[in-house]
Each structure stands twice: as C-alpha cells, then as structure tokens.
Image (spheres, helix red, strand yellow):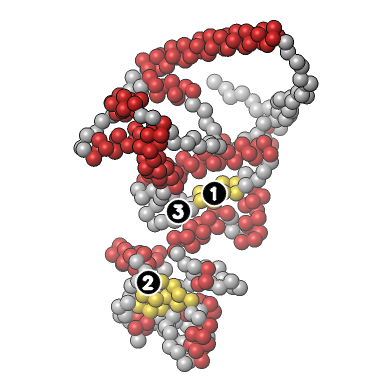
Amino acid sequence: MTRARAPAGAENIRSYSAEGRKKRSYITRYPWRERQKKLSKKAFTPADKAARAASKVARQLTLQTAVTSVQTVIEEQALLLKEKFPAHTLQHLKTTLMQNLRVTATKREISLWNAFMFLIKEENKARGMNKKADQIAREAREEWSKMTPEEKVLRTKDAVEKLKEVREMKQLSLINVPKNAFADSRSTLASIKNQLEDLNARTGTETVLIAVRSSLQDYLPPQVFTTTPRINDLFHTLYGEPVEDYASHLEGYILSGVSKEAFGAEKAPRRMNYENFESAFTDTYGIVCEGWPLPVFQAPGNVRTREEMLALISAFEDGTARFRRLSAREMEQRAKGELHIPAVQCIKPTHSVTTPGPSSSATATSSPSAAAS
C-alpha cells in the first residue's frame, strides 16, 4: 500500500494542533434582520376587529398543533434514549435534548411556592423526616390552596430570605473542598476560554487570561490563555519572560501573602536571593525575615526532609514566620549601627553564618540563628 503524494508546495504548509487553531468564520457578516418602518395606524371597523380576532385564534391553534407534534417527536426520541441509557430518567433526557449553552443574563425571582416547599422541607428535617420533593409537594398543596395571597407572603417571608442566602452561597461562597474547587475552576475557565475565542472570532478583540490558585491546598496549576502570539511577545519585551513564567510568579506572590509595602513602590527585587539575603534585600530594600523555623536559611527547594518542609509551611501559614519591611527610621538607625536588627531571625537558633554585605557591622544569618542574639 503506497501513500498518496502530497500536492505541490505542501512542504511549506504548517499544520497546527487543534489547541493552536483559532476559532474563525470566513463568512462575510451581514444583517440578519431588517427593521420595518412603522406604518400609520388604521382605524378598524367592528367587522375588521372580529375578523382579526378570529384570525388570531386560528393562528394560535395552528401554532399549538405544530408545537404538540414537535413535543411528540421529542417524547419519542427521549423514549429511545431511555432504552439505551436506562440509568437516566425520562425527564432528564428530555431536558438534555432541549438544553442550550448560553450565558445567563437575568435571574428569576424566588417564587413563594418554592419558598413554601423549602419551609416544609426544613420543618420535616427538624422532625427527623427525610421526604422527597414530590411527597412534600402532595402534602403542601392542600394547605397552600387554602391560604390567601397575604397569608402566603407572611408565611414564606423568612423562607424567601433564607433561599436568597442559599443562592448567594452557591454562587459566591468559597468552596472548602479542594477537589470540588478544582473541578469548578477547570470547567468554568474552559467555558470562559470558549467564549473568549468566539468573541475574538466575531470582533477581533484580543484577550489574555491568567488564573492562579490562592491556597496551597488547591490543585489548580497556573492557567494562561491568549488569543494572539503578540501578547507573549509583549511579555518578553516588558518583563523578559513568557506569559507562562509571569503566571508562575503571580501564583508565588499570591500564595506568599507578601504585601506590596514589603517591596516599596519605587524599586522591587526581581527574584529571591537566599545566599546573599542581607546585602540583596535587607540593606537594599529593608526587608528582614522573622521567625524562620529552620536552622539554615535557604531556599525551600534545598530543604531535604519532609518534617522541615512541613514546619516551614506551618510557620508561614500561622504567622510565626514572615517577611517584614523595616521603617525608614529603623533602616537609618541600622545603617548607623545604633540598632541591631538581624536580616534573619530564627525561632530556635542553632548556629550563625555571616552573610556578605556592604557594611561589616551589619551581620545577619544565612541561617536564622543570629536573630535571637
């Protein structure tokens, strides 16, 4: 079996993966609706009005017949799916057939009936009774039908507010299970990326999306999405690194909890320097490390044991260890030798190592041991 020869010039054609292709349509955009000019109003006679009313009823009947026939087809297709997928309910399959992906623009107000159902459910739960929604509805329908509109509002007032809190909780409250937070973030970001691709295809709008986690317990790696390579070129020009490395630095900054005051507004360090911390950070920016829990001040990547790494993480999480910026007065007194503030202060000092610095009187520890002296 021989392979088909490639057309002439095909060696110059680059093939991109599906992830590298842009969503694009080459159909020329045109107006898909026409606005008709308003016609002058015409005075109708009683006979004309009766004829228009009869025509309207006929159109409604025709429409209802057509809708019924379509619903019958959907019902038949749902029954066929039910035979193939018996684990799903018929209602679920019909809903899936009619489901459209869209961005929610409005929110429906909470109905009094839903609030009443929620109230009955909470009352049953307080009695230790766990009933399904259809059972609760049958029991509540009779009581609901006997109530006046004013009584319904009064009875469900607290339940409506509670449901609003539940809705807000589902939409905005922080997910406290890392696995659930990861799944939610991944699916939401995928939906946003698709919408940004569609937006770029329609309007040519170029976007960059960077998403990072805010807790060490989260699983989400840094997410980067761009609609044009020129954005990556800009990051190379401005920061000397690709946008992916910028996202990694952003994640580290968010996870560290360091405030902008620690670096100052006029100058900021490009990267961490553990070996020459005193000269690179304390003497230059006035930054000191307090409460370092390990015997040696070194990069976390050089920590050899799991116990030491857990101790280091725990110290920064509970606030025992932190990076602090000295005040202008403290920096001045330290430079004159009037105030001794070590660059690194250790909780349990074990040994001291003098870090190089411009001043021989400014002694700090590459290990945080000298802090306690």
* Residue at the extreme left of the image, as rendered: 128
- Earlier in the chain: of badge 3 and badge 2, it is 3
Q: Which residue is mark 3?
A: 213
Res 325 visible: yes
Image quadrant in which you'd find residue 88: top left
- At x 58%, y 12%, the residue is 60
Dot 1 corresponds to which residue?
224
Disc 2 marks which amino acid? Ala
Q: What x and y, as percent, mark residue 109?
A: 47, 36
Is residue 107 shown above or below 89?
below
For image coordinates 58% across by 38% down, the residue present is 195
Name the residue: 52% across, 31% down: 101
Q: Which of the two labelled residues, at mark 2 and mark 1, occupies the earlier sequence position?
A: 1
Q: Residue 122, labelled with which disc?
A: none
Amino acid carrying label 1: it is: Val
Q: Earlier in the sequence, mark 1 or mark 3?
A: 3
Tell me if 128 is positioned left or right of 217 in this view: left
List x then y, in percent, for residue 334: 48, 87
Residue 172 placement (x, y as % from top left):
44, 47
Residue at figure coordinates x 67%, y 43% from the top left: 205
| Residue on which the image places disc 2 | 321
Q: Nearer the viewer, residue 22 or 212?
A: 212
Q: Residues within 10 Å of mark 1 (few under 14, many from 20)?
A: some
